[in-house]
């Protein structure tokens, strides 16, 4: 089992920045894929970004590319999502997800483990 705990959400004005953190513990593997998803109010969960744990290869949803950055700190078993130039439509619950293998996946069903989510609210 893998446990994921997110933190760092909050209320921010449009144009502002936040950094989310996701601490992983339990049975983690070096060949893991870590991802961030988000679920806006009344909408389905959607892919935001992913990173391969060992190579740090990243991929972003077009809606956040150039504004968000995913990174990881192996020593701290932590994945980050730095979010700049936030917009009202970035408002959502943000979830950290993982799978214990490399996957080129952007849909929730491809990830085995999930955190509890952290709320990000952007005021316009």
Image (cartoon, grey):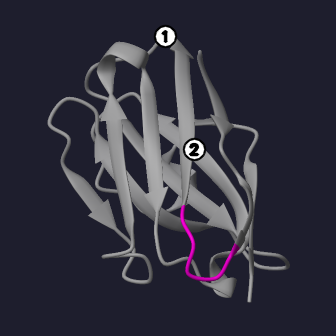
Residue 68 % position (x, y): 40, 66
Of the numbered discs 1 and 2, the one sitting upstream in the chain is 1
Q: Residue furthest toward the top?
A: 26
Tell me if residue 112 can be seen: no
Circle 2 Cα neighbour tier, 10 Å, few/some/many (<14 / 14–19 / ≥20): many
Q: Which mark is residue 27?
A: 1
Circle 1 Cα neighbour tier, 10 Å, few/some/many (<14 / 14–19 / ≥20): few
Quadrant in the picture for the C terminus: bottom right
Quadrant in the picture for the N terminus: top right
Magenta span of residues: 13-17
Q: Nearer the viewer, residue 103 or 35?
A: 35
Q: Which residue is mark 2?
A: 96
Q: Which mark is residue 111?
A: none
Please identify the dominant SS of the magenta region. loop
Q: Is residue 70 above or below residue 115?
A: below
* Residue 104: quarter of image: bottom left
Q: Is residue 73 above or below residue 29?
A: below
Q: Mark 1 touching mark 2, by CB under 8 A?
A: no
Kindly state the secondary structure of the residue where label 1 is placed. Answer: loop
Residue 48 % position (x, y): 48, 65
Q: Nearer the viewer, mark 1 or mark 2?
A: 2
Residue at image coords 33%, 14%: 75
Q: Is residue 122 above or below residue 97?
A: below
Residue at image coords 33%, 76%: 65
Kindly state the secondary structure of the residue where label 2 is placed. Answer: strand
Q: Is residue 89 above or below residue 18?
A: below
């Amino acid at each position: 089992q893998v446990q994921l705990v997110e933190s760092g959400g909050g209320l921010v004005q449009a144009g502002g920045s936040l950094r989310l953190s996701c601490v992983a513990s339990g049975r983690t593997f070096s060949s893991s894929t870590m991802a961030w998803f988000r679920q806006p109010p009344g909408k389905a969960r959607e892919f935001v970004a992913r990173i391969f744990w060992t190579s740090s290869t990243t991929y972003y949803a077009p809606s956040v590319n150039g504004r968000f950055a995913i990174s990881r700190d192996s020593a701290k078993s932590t994945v980050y999502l730095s979010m700049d130039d936030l917009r009202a439509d970035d408002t959502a619950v943000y979830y950290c997800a993982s799978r214990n293998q490399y996957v080129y996946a952007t849909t929730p069903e491809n990830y085995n483990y999930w955190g509890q989510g952290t709320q990000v609210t952007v005021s316009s």
